Amino acid sequence: MRRPIVTLTTDFGVSSPYVAELKAVLLAAQPELNLVDLTHAIPARSIRAAEVALRSAAFTFPIGTVHLVVVDPGVGTTRRPIAVAARGLIFVGPDNGVLGRALLEPGARAVVLDRKALWREPLSSTFHGRDLFAPVAAELACGLALEDVGSAIADPIPSTLPVVERGPGRVRGEVLAADDFGNLTSNIPAAEVDRGWRVTVGGSAATWCRTYGDAERGPLLCLAGSDGYLEIAIAEGSAAARLGATAGLPLVCERSERG
């Protein structure tokens, strides 16, 4: 029998003892849990960066996986704690947009976590990840249904990711984040554009390629990234360093006259 999987996504930092506290609560509830660190390197309080990380990795996990997401600048305020079920997975975290990517999935359902008997006592006003989200995530991983941990809501905070602008022969998006290689991911689905489109990022032209090893060193490249979105890169170099930014740069695709 497969051990239940719980992933952890936080902005705590890789050396933070807060990560160990989350794991301690999860394992105290169910020692057989399979805990996977999705990432703890989200920039502090960056809801958008957490969404991008989840967009890339969350849906590669097996059905039944619970994703615990603690990027929570509004902890202790009136922001709601929620859980979302989408495509056979469950996401647990604050209602601040960080679970917005899951909410975009067809048939996604959300509940507010209002079953206080499931929470850890005393409830800290500054660490809901440990005292509220982790205990609920453990219960969900061990078999509780979404409706067992909260009451249905119809108005969760939507995704914070920017919306792509589409027009005749033109698609405009933006850079969302950089990976550790300096490759830049975007919000433009790669399936919407191809080599018949001119691509500029921050006003600089990018050259199409299939993969990094096929390209010459030096020029900006554009290609279909592993997450299914248009990516900007430099062979054996850093597009982030070249462009001086990791997020917010406009990315414009225009169909060429020959396309």
Image (cartoon, helix red, strand yellow):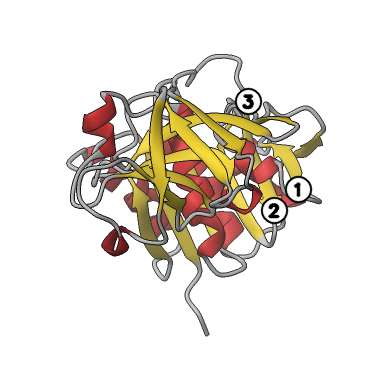
User: Which residue position holds label 1?
Assistant: 108
Residue, far bottom: 1
Q: Is residue 245 left or right of residue 247?
A: left
Q: Is residue 47 left or right of residue 157?
A: left
175 lies above or below 218: above
- Closer to us: 44 or 160: 160
**At 73% from the left edge and 39% from the top edge, which residue is drawn?**
111
Q: Is residue 212 left or right of residue 141?
A: left
Label 2 sits on what residue type?
A: Ala
Q: Is label 2 in a helix, a strand or a loop?
A: strand
Check if mark 1's residue and mark 2's residue have beta carbons within 8 Å: yes
* Crowd rating for badge 1 (residues with CA inside 10 Å; few <14, some 14–19, many 20+): some
First of labels 3, 2 by sequence position: 3
Q: Is label 3 in a helix, a strand or a loop?
A: loop
User: Which residue position holds label 3?
Assistant: 80
First of labels 3, 1 by sequence position: 3
User: Which residue position holds label 2?
Assistant: 86
**At 48% from the left edge and 65% from the top edge, which residue is drawn?**
5
* Crowd rating for badge 3 (residues with CA inside 10 Å; few <14, some 14–19, many 20+): some
* Crowd rating for badge 2 (residues with CA inside 10 Å; few <14, some 14–19, many 20+): many
Residue, far front: 258
- The percent coordinates of residue 73 (x first, y second) are 44, 20
Q: Which mark is residue 195?
A: none
